[in-house]
Amino acid sequence: MKKSLLFFVVLVLAYEVLVRNVDIWWTIGQNQWHTNRMVADDFLYGTDKYPSVMVGSSLAARLRGKIAKDSLPSDMCNLALSGQSVFDGLLILKQSGYVPKHLYIETNVIERSEDAGLQKALSLPVMAGIKTYLKSWRDSYQPMEVLVRYRPHKPSDAEILREAQPPRDERGYRTMLDIQLEKGSIPLDDKVLKGQIEKLKALVTYFQQKGTHVTLFEMPIDPALCSIRKVSQIRNEVKKEFLPLGCDFIAVPDCNNYRTTDGVHLDIPSVYTYLRYFRNAIAKRS
């Protein structure tokens, strides 16, 4: 029993040394849930402190571009989570106690509430204590993830640009788009939308009172969806409610210049097109 325990401790310490001395860049997550945990862990327990933080849904999560010149600025952390809402990132940021100088909030999916299960999983005190001191226990460094995803060298910018983008099934895409057009033609219940906006205003005010400058932005989507009733309703209400709070806005660009995989998520070339637009927008404000 003692030998087994000693062997386990030695193994854990050896792996910890490995993780701290090797640039393990290739992990991407086993599934959406795991990837979100990786993003949250890297922010909560990493040593880097970013002056700027982005939060949002899976639409903004796509903005983790890998080509430096066309990616988010190096001093910005993208805390947007796939399949989640803007509230998840904001609550993780608040839980961390960190106050960024600039906070960028994507508003496309404001009607979705936070994931209580994710928030609970990230706030377990025992695991939080372990992950604070042992980097190897964070989700990005799970041994199976590290071994299965291993790649011998980082891809070049040219290789990244050649990254496979599956051809869009236009018939299937049209079906998805028709469903979204039908759903989007129905506005959100005023009480529901007001409740979500009030919840967001409370979080925005929390950070503003601590000195954070808040900017709201909207991701481009399929042109057919860009001005439908629900989308326009959210856009107008956000502007009306947050302009008096002193928030800045990055306007949604012309959706005709972008292509999506499913109506709302940008394809790879469009991700880089929007990243250039976003970088230019924030550069004009600095």
Image (cartoon, rainbow, N blue to C red):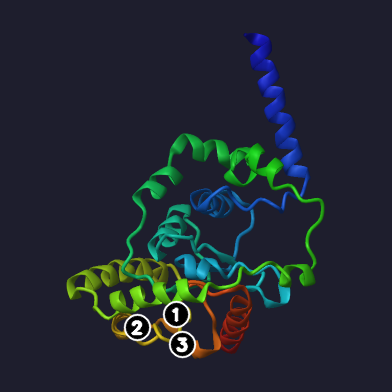
Residue at the image point whose x is 26% and y is 70% from the top: 198
Q: Is residue 181 left or right of residue 278?
A: left
Q: Is residue 40 above or below residue 187?
A: above
**Mark 1 is on which residue type?**
Glu
- Quadrant position of residue 154: bottom right
User: For residue 235, which numbered disc appears in the image?
Assistant: 2
Q: Is residue 151 above or below residue 268?
A: above
**Mark 2 is on which residue type?**
Arg
Residue 253, can we see it?
no
Q: Mark 1 sits on what residue?
A: 218
Q: Is residue 250 above or below residue 132?
A: below
Badge 2 crowding class, 10 Å Cα cut-off, few under 14, some 14 to 19, many 20 or more, is some
Residue at the image point whose x is 70% and y is 18% from the top: 7
Q: Mark 3 sits on what residue?
A: 251
Tell me where residue 173 appears, x and y as whole percent: 46, 74
Compare marks 2 and 1 and give the one earlier in the sequence: 1
Compare marks 3 and 2 and give the one earlier in the sequence: 2
Q: What kind of element bears circle 3?
A: loop
Tell me where residue 204 appears, x and y as whole percent: 37, 70
**Mark 3 is on which residue type?**
Ala
Badge 3 crowding class, 10 Å Cα cut-off, few under 14, some 14 to 19, many 20 or more, is some
Q: What kind of element bears circle 1?
A: loop
Tell me where residue 252 appears, x and y as whole percent: 46, 86
Compare marks 3 and 1 and give the one earlier in the sequence: 1
Residue at the image point whose x is 36% and y is 66% from the top: 203
Q: Is residue 77 left or right of residue 211?
A: right
User: For residue 30, which numbered disc appears in the image?
Assistant: none
Q: Are marks 3 and 1 in contact (CB under 8 Å)?
A: yes
Tell me where residue 102 appears, x and y as whole percent: 52, 73
Q: What kind of element bears circle 2?
A: helix
Q: Are marks 2 and 1 in contact (CB under 8 Å)?
A: yes
Name the quarter where the N terminus is drawn. Answer: top right
